[in-house]
Image (cartoon, coloured by chain):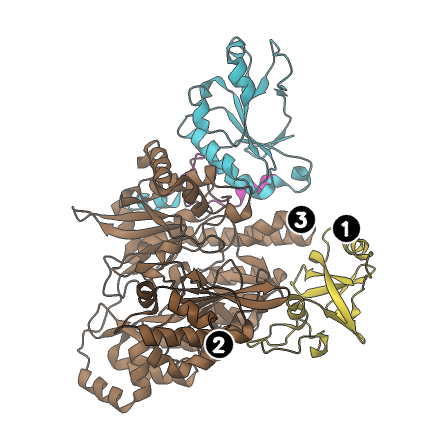
Chain colours: A yellow, B brown, C cyan
């Protein structure tokens, strides 16, 4: 199960493809592609006249947990929820992804 | 310190205008990301995990108080109120918007700063000793040469599209505090038998996937020939450096594959064919640049050492800070102060806008308005009268900047890692924090100890050169840490040896404990860890780490 | 289409001879480096203008004796990030005294034009974008330079030293 993510061109914020040319910082609103449909989703995400609003769109693996979409890799969980340490612990660019989006284990 | 003249001012203004137009063209869709990426990188702008990251150049680590205040303003106004000092003496801001960057660069230009070539496949920041101009063991101040090289390297038309980045470091002291041997090209200031200044040139150092130390290719290049010789080295690299494989494209790979002797021959042949006089560096020009770095007018009034002694005796915390955070100065009555940006439990190298402003004020009051950035990610006030040290310490301590741990085990070099960096394979900051928390109480007993942590193989945390190095890697989705032993920066530079299988992140602290215990048991006298390691070998350490498994 | 050093656009009126094509008696032609090596004697007999297409893997040293034979040398940027032709250009202009037209071909983009010009290129193979995006402006973006280069623009060290005369 996959979604498309990248960074917003003008400010670098982490964004997710929500379909129909829309990008959102809220990962729970990302359009999820079931197996076999991921490539089509990535292609759809790159349709549009330059400049695309996103930089470097890629597919990432996710799981559903209730209403939430959770990335599988730690790297993507950090992108969704902010640094795990320091002055910006848990911060996300637009506070779009509350702690429920998956990084609940800040200790290692 | 160096002051821009009309040429420098006009140049950075032209650069800002050029970059502003490049951003406009990118946002208008006239430039693709592939076309724009090298252009923004040549102005220090990366795209990282959470946002754009701007790496601001701090040439050879020197800052005026005015510049530091501007950095504080920029972090507050355009970022999240804090910055990260790097292992190349630069400042990184991790929450930057592309659309703000032309204005940020304009603000930097207004205080004679920029972000030119802090990324990209050309010359990066030329670094030197953070104690330059103050240290007692200098042959000559290296900063004029660092400034001369910086200018020569700025938008060099022949060498702006090299196979890969190119990092230069200069040292002019008996002790190498600039880690010269880990650079693509290193310069040791030397005097020949006639007392003339020149440089020993070393090439081919670098960390990362293939850690190598730089080797001497020419024991003495006359100062006058500096540009022509550098150009010969770069021309050989530009021609023969590999462009087919990103991981084999640094000059160190070329030197390794040709051998240092053959590489030196190629450079010599190129240099002999060059019109050296056309680009000769004349003595009067060096003198002109050097005049900007004249020492401040030190106060020659004798310091009341007895009073200082009494203060030290009465204040053990201050005594400890003096012992670890101050170093001898060439001027009588003065000291070099290192401000630790490694308070236990905080992010190594981070500094808030408020702290920057405080340090700028202290620099004005007590250090002739000068600050330095050390590659160990700490700040330096280079010229403080010894009878001002107590007052300084009290103010630093009140602001959380009084950690007395320079060179000790909690003075960890640590890259931003996977909390920030898109290249990272594991987190590094939480590991550093836990180690510092665990070890700081014993750090005086442990003594000088350099732990260095990198969140990926690119080694921005210099883990190869740590007495103990930690490299964070991903193993099936889990963060694990490879331990290296016996590394060292400086004169006895050595690449650390891999100790064995990587350890899980919750095993790191225990592993470090065991290694330090072996060191404490086996060391003789004042031996540093690398010396003990060289003397007793790897076996006792490996055994301690892995025997019980 | 060509962009030339003063910012004008112009038409390329050279014939770029393929390695399998016979050498014509007349007309301005360029040949590949390989062709130059095999057919130098034949090419020597011609009187019309001759040009050379030099790959970025060949050292200019290889044509040191021959530069005066060419009215045009074309150097190549296979990708704009591949900077070998900058060194070739600078050496051709300085060490080997080449005085003819020096042209940049391949992945030639607006933001490298200034560097190319400095290294001695005086013409650039470009496409429609050069008109639409007014690439000629790139040549005027800087007038302060920190290095001596084949374009002989004043450089900062010389400018500073001459202020003291």
Indicate the position of residue B285 as horizontal and vertical percent values: 29, 48
Q: Measuring 50% from the left and 73% from the top, which residue is drawn there? A: B508
Disc 1 element: loop
Read off the chain for label 1.
Answer: A
- Name the residue tied to disc 2: B509
Q: How many marks?
A: 3
In three-dimensional space, the C-alpha distance between marks 3 and 1, rounded to whole angstroms, equals 11 Å
Q: Is residue B466 magenta?
A: no
Read off the chain for label 2.
Answer: B
Give yes or no for contact between labels 1 and 2 (Cβ–Cβ under 8 Å).
Answer: no
Look at the image and tell me in which quarter the N terminus of chain B lies: bottom left
Q: Quadrant of the rendered structure where residue A52 is?
A: bottom right
As drawn, is B80 to the left or to the right of B126?
right
Please name whichever residue, B323 or B153, is drawn nearer the observer in this view of the structure.
Answer: B323
In three-dimensional space, the C-alpha distance between marks 1 and 2, rounded to whole angstroms, equals 52 Å
In the rendered structure, which disc, 3 or 2, sits on the residue that comes first in sequence?
3
Q: Residues within 10 Å of mark 1 (few under 14, many from 20)?
A: few
Read off the chain for label 3.
Answer: B
Front position among marks 3 and 2: 2
Q: Which range is magenta? A: C136-152
- Name the residue tied to disc 3: B32
Q: Is residue B7 above or below residue A9?
A: above
Disc 3 element: loop
Give yes or no for contact between labels 3 and 1 (Cβ–Cβ under 8 Å).
Answer: no
- Name the residue tied to disc 1: A49
Residue B347 shows in the view: no
């Amino acid at each position: 199960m996959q979604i498309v993510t990248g960074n917003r061109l003008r400010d670098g914020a982490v964004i997710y493809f929500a379909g129909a040319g829309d990008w959102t910082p809220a990962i729970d609103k990302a359009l999820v592609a079931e197996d076999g449909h991921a490539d089509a989703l990535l292609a759809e995400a790159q349709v549009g006249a330059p400049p695309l609003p996103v930089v470097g769109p890629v597919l990432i693996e996710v799981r559903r947990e209730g209403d939430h979409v959770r990335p599988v890799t730690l790297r993507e969980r950090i992108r969704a929820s902010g640094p795990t340490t320091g002055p910006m612990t848990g911060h996300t660019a637009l506070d779009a992804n509350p702690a429920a989006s998956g990084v609940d284990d800040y200790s290692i | 310190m160096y002051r821009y003249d009309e040429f420098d001012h006009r140049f950075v203004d032209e650069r800002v205008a050029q970059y502003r137009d490049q951003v406009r063209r990118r946002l208008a869709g006239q430039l693709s990301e592939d076309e724009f990426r090298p252009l923004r990188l040549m102005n220090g702008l990366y795209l990282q995990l959470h946002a754009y990251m701007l790496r601001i150049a701090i040439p050879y680590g020197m800052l005026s108080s005015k510049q530091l205040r501007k950095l504080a303003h920029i972090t507050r106004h355009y970022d999240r109120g804090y910055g990260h000092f790097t292992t190349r003496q630069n400042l990184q801001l991790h929450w930057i918007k592309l659309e703000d960057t032309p204005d940020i660069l304009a603000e930097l230009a207004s205080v004679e700063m920029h972000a030119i070539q802090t990324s990209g496949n050309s010359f990066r920041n030329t670094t030197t000793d953070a104690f330059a101009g103050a240290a007692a063991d200098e042959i000559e101040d290296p900063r004029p040469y660092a400034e001369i090289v910086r200018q020569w390297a700025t938008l060099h038309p022949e060498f702006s599209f090299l196979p890969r980045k190119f990092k230069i470091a200069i040292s002019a002291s008996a002790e190498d505090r600039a880690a010269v041997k880990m650079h693509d090209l290193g310069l040791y200031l030397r005097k020949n038998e006639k007392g003339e200044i020149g440089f020993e040139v070393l090439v081919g150092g670098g960390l990362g996937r293939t850690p190598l130390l730089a080797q001497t290719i020419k024991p003495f290049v006359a100062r006058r020939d500096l540009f022509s010789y550098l150009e010969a080295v770069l021309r050989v690299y530009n021609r023969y450096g590999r462009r087919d494989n990103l991981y084999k494209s640094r000059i160190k790979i070329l030197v390794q594959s040709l051998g240092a002797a053959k590489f030196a021959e190629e450079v010599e042949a190129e240099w002999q064919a060059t019109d050296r006089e056309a680009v000769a560096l004349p003595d009067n020009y060096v003198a002109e640049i050097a005049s900007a770095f004249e020492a401040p007018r030190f106060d020659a009034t004798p310091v009341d050492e007895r009073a200082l002694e009494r203060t030290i005796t009465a204040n053990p915390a201050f005594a400890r800070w003096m012992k670890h955070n101050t170093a001898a100065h060439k001027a009588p009555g003065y000291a070099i102060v290192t401000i630790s940006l490694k308070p236990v439990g905080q992010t190594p190298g981070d500094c808030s806008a408020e702290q920057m402003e405080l340090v700028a004020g202290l620099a004005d009051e007590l250090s002739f308005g000068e600050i330095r950035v050390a590659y160990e990610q700490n700040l330096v006030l280079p010229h403080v009268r010894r009878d001002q040290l107590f007052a300084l310490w009290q103010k630093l301590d009140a602001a959380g900047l009084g950690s007395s741990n320079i060179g000790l085990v909690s003075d960890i070099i640590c890259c931003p890692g996977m909390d920030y960096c898109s290249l990272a394979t594991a987190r590094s900051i939480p590991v550093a924090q836990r180690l510092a928390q665990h070890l700081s109480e014993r750090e005086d007993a442990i003594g000088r100890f350099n732990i260095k942590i990198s969140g990926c193989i690119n080694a921005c945390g210099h883990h190869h050169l740590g007495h103990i190095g930690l490299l964070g890697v991903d193993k099936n989705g889990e963060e694990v840490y490879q331990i290296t032993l016996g590394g060292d920066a400086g004169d006895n530079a050595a690449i650390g040896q891999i100790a064995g299988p990587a350890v899980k992140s919750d095993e790191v602290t225990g592993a470090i404990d065991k290694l330090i215990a072996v060191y404490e048991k086996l060391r003789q006298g004042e031996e540093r860890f690398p010396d003990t390691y060289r003397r007793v070998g790897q076996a006792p350490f490996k055994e301690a780490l892995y025997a019980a498994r | 289409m060509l962009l030339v050093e003063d910012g004008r656009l112009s038409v390329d009126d050279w014939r770029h001879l393929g390695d399998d094509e016979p050498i014509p008696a007349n007309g301005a032609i360029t040949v590949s480096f390989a062709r130059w090596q095999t057919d130098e004697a034949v090419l020597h007999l011609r009187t019309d203008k001759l040009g050379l297409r030099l790959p970025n893997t060949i050292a200019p040293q290889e044509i040191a004796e021959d530069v005066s034979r060419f009215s045009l040398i074309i150097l190549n940027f296979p990708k704009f990030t591949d900077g070998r032709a900058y060194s070739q250009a600078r050496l051709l202009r300085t060490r080997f005294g080449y005085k003819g037209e020096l042209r940049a071909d391949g992945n030639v983009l607006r933001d490298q034009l200034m560097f190319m010009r400095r290294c001695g290129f005086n013409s650039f193979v470009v496409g429609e974008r050069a008109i639409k995006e007014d690439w000629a402006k790139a040549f005027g973006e800087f007038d302060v330079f920190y290095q001596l280069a084949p374009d002989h623009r004043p450089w900062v060290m010389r400018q500073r030293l001459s202020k003291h005369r």
